[in-house]
Image: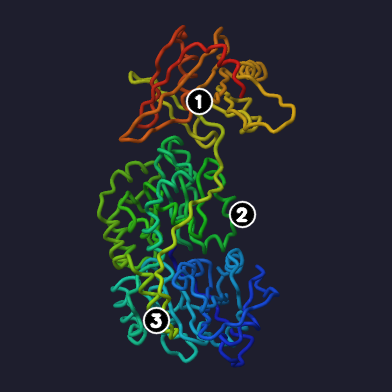
Amino acid sequence: MSPDDANEPTSTCGNSGIRPPVSSTLDTYGRRATGDGRRATGDGRRATGDGRAVLFAARSAVALYRLLDVLPVFSGDARITRLFTLVPGSDFGADVFSAIDARGGRTVPWSEACGRSYDLIVAASPKGDLRLLRGPHVLIPHGAGFNKSIRGEGSADSASGLDPAYLRRTHDHAPAALHALAHPDQVARLAAADPRAARRAKVIGDLTLERVLASMPLRDRYRAALGTGARELLVLVSTWGPESLVRQRPGLPARLAAQLPHDEYQLALVVHPNERSLLGTYELTERLAPALDAGMILADSHEEWASVLIAADALVTDHGSAALYYCAAQDRPVVSVHQGGGELIPGSPMGVLLDRIPRLERDEDIADALRAYRQGPGHAAAQAAFAPAGDAVDRLRTEVYALLGLAPPAYGVTPRLLPAPVPAARVPAAFDVHVATTTAGVRITRHPAGIGPPGHHLAVEHGAASEQLVRSAGLLYRRPLPASTAPVDLAWTADGWTRHALSAHPGCRSAAALLPSGGCLLRVRGHERTYAAQVEPRSEAGRIVQIDPAIALSAVHARLVSPQPAPDSHTALNCLVGERTFRITLRPATNTEAAQVI
């Protein structure tokens, strides 16, 4: 994920004494974090023989996540001891220790870290008092490209990450031993900012991009984990700061959730870690509650955001460079909501992208904006940000082992695949259902209840929605319960529950039970018979598309409460959902179906 740390006050070390290299004294301090920045007790093992200590210095969560992508370079090498420290002074450092602790990493307090020497120091931001850390420095970018200039910090108009005010920050004011850059143009930009630093620069590639590209075959798995199905996954991407999507258009997620049909689109939001650190996850989720309640996914800031981008069908972005990973992986629609300002650097990769893609002026025009995208700009922007991918891990491995004075292990290393997302999604259980009867069939468009205008009827899942919604339902339905472990069980039959539901809820027009067999049993107030409905799946180019039976129930409900005579035998009904048509068979229910346990 990309982006830029803000400029915060520098810090000093409480321990300025020079001690022996850490590789010979690890047992005195190299221990696991406790989560609050203090050292835990326990035995730190002494590095042996040709062992080397590598310190990963992070000043924010986003910098830490970039450093974690570097770790496979040292995978399996028992000669390397991996340590972490928090570079103080950033407003966005609150989550660093907890993230390290969650992974069982060993931390060194800053006051102790800058009083010792290390065999290698790896950082993803040149800011902060890195000059106080002793040892060869390796600097990697903390995002895709150098696209932003942060007002009020460093040199005027300098790209964050390439500012000469921060580049010479080692203890002897020498440049970093290695600037590991992602594109030849970045070397040229570095040379313009600081020719001395550019002499230590090499085009390595982007290790986060390597993970994204290696994980592309897992797209279907990610979509299954997200519950996307046959819907279009629309991802909103926000950077941090006053020009970000979440600051400039905070109501956009909720408005899109209200506007886009639930059965045709799924929404997800990727928020920059700095914004999460500033607000806290609780505050952020409360601000986003209307969209989250409607089913929007808020992607986690470490790894999950990249899995979500791989799963995406379309993207809405501000000027944050996370969009470049999406563009590098696939040339699918991307639209801009960037409203201008002083942060975006003209001619940068994100500047190239935003100049050439559709802009979303009005939220209600989202479908038109996505259709207006033409392939090409995303690919061009990615080419401007990333060198050809494929061997970034090997390149960085060669360079850092040379700095360590070690031969790399004989075995190869590959980028680690991104894990499947584990979203904490809130699944809507009540829908305002809009119905349009056409010559082709009954068109059903559902929106989560309460975020848009009311429809033809309110369809509510019993046992998953509030009592207020249940009592307001025009169509009330129930799904089968999980198998019981009670020694003496009590369960409804489909017929018994539908009779009970209509009796208990006088305002309800229809009650339906989704049967374990996949069909539905439906009872309509005022009708003598009970109906069975079965929706047929569609076949599309070797794939099977199925809809939730609850959608079909809304089509059947609309047909049976209409002025048309009720069917007295088998009849077929077409249910239109988006561009797809599903065939529903409707007939009187059998005694066996009525007696099914739900």
Q: In the image, is residue 341 above or below residue 516?
A: below
**Mark 3 and mark 2: span between their CA atoms?**
39 Å
Q: Please tell me whether mark 3 sits on a helix, a strand or a loop.
A: strand
How many dots with numbers?
Answer: 3
Mark 1 nearby-residue class (10 Å; few <14, some 14–19, many ≥20): few
Q: Residue at x 58, y 20 (%)?
A: 511
Indicate the quadrant where residue 461 lies: top right
User: Which numbered disc covers residue 228?
Assistant: none
Front of the two marks 3 and 2: 3
Q: Residue at x 30, y 52 (%)?
A: 331
Q: Quadrant of the C terminus?
A: top right
Task: Identify the amino acid type marked 1.
Answer: Gly
Q: Position of residue 283 (x, y in %)?
A: 60, 55
Q: Which residue is mark 1?
A: 518
**Mark 1 and mark 3: span between their CA atoms?**
61 Å
Q: Residue at x 37, y 51 (%)?
A: 217
